[in-house]
Amino acid sequence: MKYNLLVAQSGGPTAAINASLCGVIEAAMASEEIEKVYGAVNGIEGIFAGRIIRLDTQFSSAEQLDLLCSTPSSALGSCRFKMPSPEQGPDRYDALLEAFRALNIGCFVYIGGNDSMDTANKIGAYCHDHGLSVRVIGVPKTIDNDLPITDHTPGFGSAAKYIAVTMQEIVRDAEIYPLKSVTIVEVMGRNAGWLTAASALARQNGCFGPQLIYLPEAPFDPEDFLKRVDALLQTTDTVVVAVSEGVRLADGSYVAESEQSGQVDAFGHKYLSGVGKYLERLVTARLTCKVRSLELSVLQRAGGHIQSRTDVEEARRAGAKAVECALSGQSQVMVAFYRVSDAPYLVRIGTAPLSEVANVERKVPREWINAEGCDVTQEAVSYLLPLIQGETVIPYENGVPAHFVFDKTPERL
Amino acid sequence: MKYNLLVAQSGGPTAAINASLCGVIEAAMASEEIEKVYGAVNGIEGIFAGRIIRLDTQFSSAEQLDLLCSTPSSALGSCRFKMPSPEQGPDRYDALLEAFRALNIGCFVYIGGNDSMDTANKIGAYCHDHGLSVRVIGVPKTIDNDLPITDHTPGFGSAAKYIAVTMQEIVRDAEIYPLKSVTIVEVMGRNAGWLTAASALARQNGCFGPQLIYLPEAPFDPEDFLKRVDALLQTTDTVVVAVSEGVRLADGSYVAESEQSGQVDAFGHKYLSGVGKYLERLVTARLTCKVRSLELSVLQRAGGHIQSRTDVEEARRAGAKAVECALSGQSQVMVAFYRVSDAPYLVRIGTAPLSEVANVERKVPREWINAEGCDVTQEAVSYLLPLIQGETVIPYENGVPAHFVFDKTPERL
């Protein structure tokens, strides 16, 4: 008996999450067991709100599937919904099961990060405990690269490539004037420094910066930082620093925390200054040089025009693998990558139990950061480098990339 | 008798200024009259400091010339030096003439923006008045697009493309959650709104944002702004605003000026908040929605990985044209573009007298901004669109773009 598949996207967007969605859709369309492919708009919330659309009917060519892969952010929309336990929120589970039954769902695929894998884990366990035939599969997605077990997460490679490319351009921009200058670049990553570590890849083709790289995994000492910047300025004009938004002092507090506590603006609001701005002011106060800071902000996660081909191809394969897992009877697992070797870069795609993935955060190993805590080691670079390899062909129309946009009217059901 | 050519770059970097440099070098190398091609490191300051290097000997293949064209920022370095008048700074002119004589310079090409054309104009006039055979040619360059006479300036098209592409990605990123949100994007341009106007090109392929676009050429009314944002939030979840760093109130003061005046941080420094941050706090204080702001900062001028092919090809032609002008005996002129038609896009490359270009700033015509002062007109779009067309082939190595780097040791003389 044929059944239908339901897929949804959750958490922060990436430049590769739609490639995973594409992988799910095309594998489901190719399967003889799966009849219709549905998508929930805005993740699990879309199921509760009845915002479910038909996906497979919206593609009439291979080019459209490719276009979805090169479209950044979450084409189905997203949510940040914390799924309660069955005891705390039985009505949520009732609503889910009702939707699954009404749509004859035999497979539910959730594409997301830590929180989303927790949601998938709870739904999968519930279906299993209640003898339901719905197979629940997670597909990893996060620019933060902080999921456990899997070697890396789709979406990270493209963000890492964006950061490496942009950081090299920032260095080129910073070095043109014959004067002492310090540029501080704040990179995303509240707890895990993977993205900030990727800034080291800007040095691959001989570029001298960034010279200092600070991750949340090693304690940050403002005085030591100033000393290092000052020492660099003795021998060079241009200093570029990459710093994670989540760097902490030895006592565990965020570096910019004290700075953020007291100040209010004309509206009575606190100045929520990031660590980049904080370090800019610190250097301005203590050293004699031109200083500026900048935040890569959402650009680093939405940069669809500069995807890593490795990342996008893996994301697409991960989506297809999720369908394959469901078809073979698996449930309560997340698709996971297992690295075989760095050079040549070889990965095996397998699975990991959702229960072991949910709510676990993977950080950069301390030994991949140098002893001084101001750079990453060659081991880190060897791990990161394969993930940013290759470029994708972005279809441009009228000078800007063409994007795939779903018709989200639920009437299509 | 053969002579040598000296070229230098000045002002802020762009993604196309090295293409103009390439155009100068290859045209000079191809000429029978010009023997050696020299470059001054850090603009005119490099001449005073004796930092002059040989350029033509550093290229051994066409690929290397192409690589220079895809390398962003100023490969020769830059400066922000205000050339005094001959009366105010006779020693500067003496130093220049000494360098010109020592190196047998028959042609001096200066690539830059408003200030640089002023410098070129002064040097050209001085050489002419003193009967020197040095021909002085300016090549326009500025992301700000604010030079007069020329239809547009090389460097602007690539920055405009970066802004259009990035703005579309910001909209994609902002729209994924089912909640009311306002995203404010601050774009460069202190007096001229050309770059901010280019954000309208993000809507070329059907993208709904940015819905509000504010240029310095029309007075900004914070209350009217709030009303428009509020009205948009009644009918849509996602509002994206593009605002020039230089927007002003009706009284001519900068919008964030009052906000910037009083506050000091822990170091006793003023909070130099940009207009984006200011509007973020304004919306937060007055409307109920998620608000964030971001600055495109130097990324918009250094984005070499996303050049406009039209821009880079024109920049290269402009460099070649400068040499051609000098060879034909012209001096005291800037290369200029004259638009023949928007569609098909046709331009003629000619010249403009440096004296008419120097120190004149060209702004966006008020009639290219809508009556409400919150968007640009179709006429503006028709003007802008051809300038961002086409992409260049960026050579990647190890996952990041390869860049051309000059050997800057003066020993090569």
Image: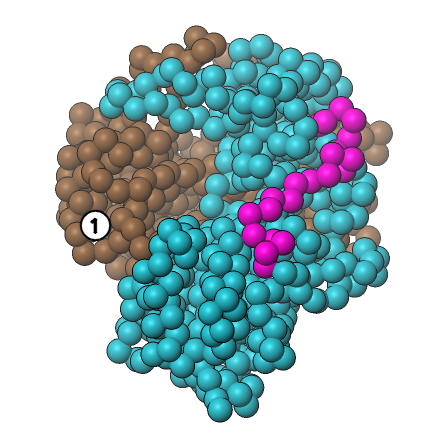
Chain colours: A cyan, B brown
The verdict on residue A358 being magenta is yes
Amino acid on which the number 1 mark rests in the picture: Leu
In this picture, is A182 found above or below A332? above
Locate residue B397, reporting x and y percent.
74, 54
Q: Nearer the viewer, residue A47 or B276?
A: A47
Quadrant containing the C terminus of chain A in the rendered view: bottom left
Residue shown at 64% from the left, 36% from the top = A171
The verdict on residue A166 being magenta is no
Residue A377 in view: yes
Q: Nearer the viewer, residue B9 or B143?
A: B143
Q: Which residue is mark 1?
A: B233
In this picture, is B255 found above or below B6? above
In the image: residue A65, left or right of residue B216: right
* Start-end of magenta stretch: A354-374
Label 1 marks which chain's residue? B
Locate residue A328, reporting x and y percent.
63, 79
Residue shown at 69% from the left, 61% from the top = A337
Residue shown at 23% from the left, 56% from the top = B236
Examine the image and state in which quarter residue A216 appears: top right
Residue B161 in view: no
Locate residue B95, reporting x and y percent.
66, 19
Query: Crowding near pointer 1: few (<14 within 10 Å), some, many (20+)?
Result: some
Examine the image and state in which quarter residue B190 appears: top left
Locate residue B399, reporting x and y percent.
70, 54
